[in-house]
Amino acid sequence: MKKVIIALISIAAIGLIGFTLYGNKQEMKEEAKLAEETSDAIPVEVTSLQKKALEAKVKADGILEAKTDLTILSETTGKVVAVHKEKGATVDKGELLAQVENEIIQTEVSAAKTNLEKLETDLERFTKLSEENAVTKRQLEDVKIGLKNAEAQYRSAKKRLENTYIRATAAGKINDDFLQEGEFINQGQRLYEIVDASTLKLKVKLTASEVLALKEGDSVKISTQVFPQKEFEGKVKAIASKADDALKYEVEIMMQNQGEVQLKPGMYATAHFNFKSNNAKYYLNRDALIGSVQNPEVYVIENGESKLKKLTLGESRGDLLEVLNGLNPNDKVVMSGQINLSDGTEVKVLDK
């Protein structure tokens, strides 16, 4: 009897295990079937338009530049016979910096001047003779032509002589020099680098609505990382009439650099603008775009499928782009997964 009971229990256990395995198998089949049914749907994340007013305070970064930053090139050829100013010297515009040998050119200038004076005398004499019909008109015309050529030769010789005197073309400090006495230099060779940092300029980029709130002459606060506790003041010098590829407008700010704390060209600086606006606009995250801001497109979800839409954009503010046309506030815009989509692709929106 005991053996019979044990046998029945074993049979029941085997049956229970079999039923459980069968149930698990059926569940796995159902899951696999569901996966097959949904495998064609592309998972995506979505976003929507955000309505907000522009921030009152805007910061724009740039690099400080010297108002004057130029390189003096040689306009002559010859040996440097004197160097009057070197690196670190402060110079005025027109001040003599160096000199190149010019004895031969001086002789050419003297000869050209003598020839010019002779032809001026000849013209005066031939003019009087022409009035007395003692010379032909052709002879008088030849003298006039010769005089014009002599004047051109004299001006050319004087210019070549002047080029042997290397002068500062602007006031400032010699940031570097590239010549030495006794060196033979060629035309076009770099000689001096002059920088005037007494006035600095800062170029920053702003959006269309921001530049519309600006005008030339407006004051702007400027800060730097090297002097975080110090605030500088500049004035708007120029505003670009045309936007760049990012739909931003360049604003040039000038500032005097003559206080106790002086900045240097090449330093990073931040311009601080205060804009007042109560107009709320619709913005979209830049990550939702397909392609560039010049040809903006997005995918929206309609009836479980992706639909391609073209947009008209306005200003950009960091990661946000103003949408002027193409979307409704309740549109679900694909922000992640666009790379796998085409127009009409079945999609599945993932929960955030």
Image (cartoon, grey):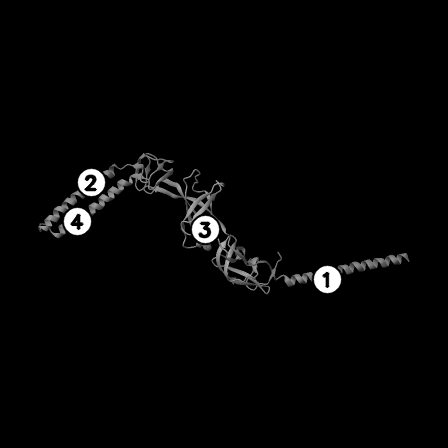
Residue 171 lies, in percent from the top left, at 35, 40
Nearer to us of marks 4 and 2 is: 4
Q: Amino acid at mark 3?
A: Lys
Q: Which residue sits furthest bottom? A: 303
Residue 298 appearing in the image: yes
Nearer to us of marks 2 and 3 is: 3
Residue 344 lies, in percent from the top left, at 56, 64
Q: How many marks?
A: 4
Label 2, label 3: how far apart the Cα atoms are: 58 Å
Q: Amino acid at mark 2?
A: Ala
Mark 4 lies on residue: 144
Q: Earlier in the sequence, mark 4 or mark 2?
A: 2
Which numbered dot is residue 205? 3
Q: Residue at x 16, y 43 (%)?
A: 118
Q: Quadrant of the N terminus?
A: bottom right
Q: Residues within 10 Å of mark 2 (few under 14, many from 20)?
A: some
Q: Are marks 2 and 3 in contact (CB under 8 Å)?
A: no
Nearer to us of marks 4 and 3 is: 3
Q: Earlier in the sequence, mark 4 or mark 3?
A: 4
Mark 2 lies on residue: 111
Residue 262 lies left or right of residue 46; in this view the side is left
Which numbered dot is residue 26? 1
Q: Amino acid at mark 4?
A: Lys
Residue closer to the observer: 107 or 310 = 310
